[in-house]
Image (spheres, rainbow, N blue to C red):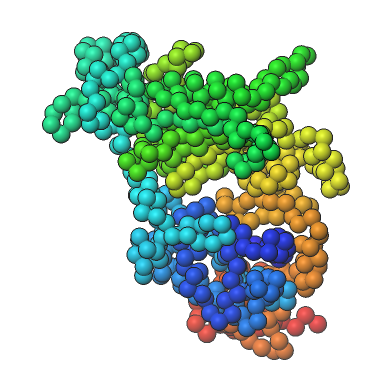
Amino acid sequence: MVGPELARLVALLRQARTDLMDVEVKAAAGGLPKSVRDTLSAFSNDRGGTLLLGLDENDDFRPAVGFDAARIRDALASACSDDLHPPVRAEIDIVPFGGSLVVVGEVGELDPRFKPCYVAARGEYNGSFTRGGDGDRRLTDFEIHLLHTNRGQPEDDRQPVANALPEDLESVEVRALVDRVRLRQPRAFANLSSEQVLRRLNVLAEDQEGRLRPTLGGLLALGAYPQQFFPQLNVTFVVYPGLSAEDVPVNGPRFLDNRSFDGPIPVMVDEAVTAVLRNTSVRSFVEGAGRTDVYDYPAEAVREAVANALLHRDYSPYSRGAPVQITLYADRLVVANPGGLFGAVTTDDLGGEGVTSTRNSVLAKLLQDVRLPESGRMVCENRASGIPTMLRELRRIGSPPPEFHSRITRFKVVMPRHALLGDETMRWIAGLHQRGLTPTQHLALAEMRAGRPVTNGSMRNLGLEAHRATAELSDLVNRGVAVRIGERRHARYVLAPADGSAERGFEALPPARSVEEEVLAAFTDQSELSRRELEQCTGLSWTKVLRALNTLEAQGRIAFTAPARSPHRRYRRVDER
């Protein structure tokens, strides 16, 4: 992070008057606070974040008096490597700000295979944290359980269901499944009996007493009524008249619709999609030379969202009391399921070619051969095509891409109802007086204006290649209309403060100097300095100092006093007169 980006981020913090979800600020004037370790754990277990040390939140985020940047940088690096398990790999820099120095730590999300990251001295169940609001919250036992299951392949869907019998499966659908797999994979199934086919597909399995019973996956895909055994493994649907559950008109109804859908997954998908379409309006858009009438939410996009929620949800005993929830508000459709993303997939990966990972492998295999009642098509293709289909259908009618929110215990898809680039939004963009914006930059600004951070993945969902997405977002930052939070794959972009405080804050700083100029300025009179002394004087990392020394040496602006590998090697500035 460089000076201008830090200034804009601080202006954003001043506007919010508090920390942000993925930005934590500490004065650290008296040393590294112990709570920083909780934050390092929380950022690692969540989506990453930025740690700013040396700013006083109680003094309008001004530089903290008595802050020792070099000492705090070293203490933070030590905490990352020694106090957390597994160690946190953070990018730590010292950045000039307001005539002082600030330590900036960029913490990336930990690979799901190694979560949770916890404070070693407290142990896994007392020292694991996540972000909540603008602070850190200890993970619950259930959340830690989910992180553990994410390390391998859960087998909840292949377990036999107690008290269920083969007769609890829908016979017509069972015969159709057996016929289909025999035809599609004759080498594996053609010569097997129906019972053997169902065993091989994990529709049936023996319990501990040797009795043949439907598995959880088999019951959900082919059962006559799975809710007999799991009453809450269903779908609920609520329609609110306003923008929230509390937004109720005076003397008006609390709900416009409120129902639940039972049965196997194919039945629940069809009935849920029908209910959503029944409660939405039809609008028109121009396609080619004619006009097309469509629902606010394309049926195909809704179907994929509901099917994905039922396929990828957590089916462990912890979550069997929680249904998939569909909520329709005046301005958006929300589909939420228990359990966050599984495996190494992140929200930025969603929509990419071939991106897929499921915690329910048996169910995923079955649903590619099980029919939807209304159309006769398969519930899912199991080809990583669900999210791309959703994105394509929404782009086709001019709707913004959906938002994906993944937490440890919950995954949520939000489809906005309105078109992104309405007349009011276009007037607002014109008022920014930014010439040469691309169409996708217009869309990105509209998303930010709606309060939704934009990422490289968001731009890819709008149809850009990854390198072009980064270039267009960086251009918005350089124009001063957006602020970047985080680095590399964890970068999020939000609107810069509208009052110009970011620019005023930056102008109040000393003129920006290059790293080489920072190193040169450390030399006074005829002083000779070691590389370590240059690090302490400038607040720069040793790699930046070394790179600057090599450049200055090549330019003839510094000289050295000993060979490169000598422990006595020091540097002095060459008189340029």
Image point 38% across, 23% down: which residue? 264
Left or right: 191 in relation to 301: left
Q: Position of residue 216 (x, y in %)?
A: 30, 30
Q: Residue at x 34, y 40 (%)?
A: 316
Q: Position of residue 108 (x, y in %)?
A: 52, 56
For residue 504, what is the image quadrant? bottom right
- Picture coordinates of residue 164, whole percent (x, y): 24, 26
Nearer to me, 98 or 158: 158
Check the picture and name the quadrant holding the N terminus.
bottom right
Q: Residue at x 72, y 89 (%)?
A: 525
Task: Give the camera-side residue of 324 and 21.
Answer: 324
Q: Is residue 553 above or below residue 336?
A: below
In this rendering, is residue 44 above or below 82? above
Q: In this view of the protein, can residue 516 be seen by the observer?
A: no
Residue that protrudes farthest toward the front in the picture: 251
Vertically, is 572 above or below 461?
Answer: below
Q: Is residue 236 left or right of residue 527?
A: left
Q: Closest to the observer: 264 or 32?
A: 264
Query: Can residue 321 be seen from the camera position used here?
Result: yes
Q: Which residue in the rendered view is the most extreme toward the left?
A: 209
Left or right: where 167 falls relative to 267: left
Q: How many marks?
A: 0
Can you tell which quarter of the image residue 392 is in? Answer: top right
Give percent across and percent down for residue 407: 49, 47
Is the C terminus in the top left, top right, bottom left or bottom right quadrant?
bottom right
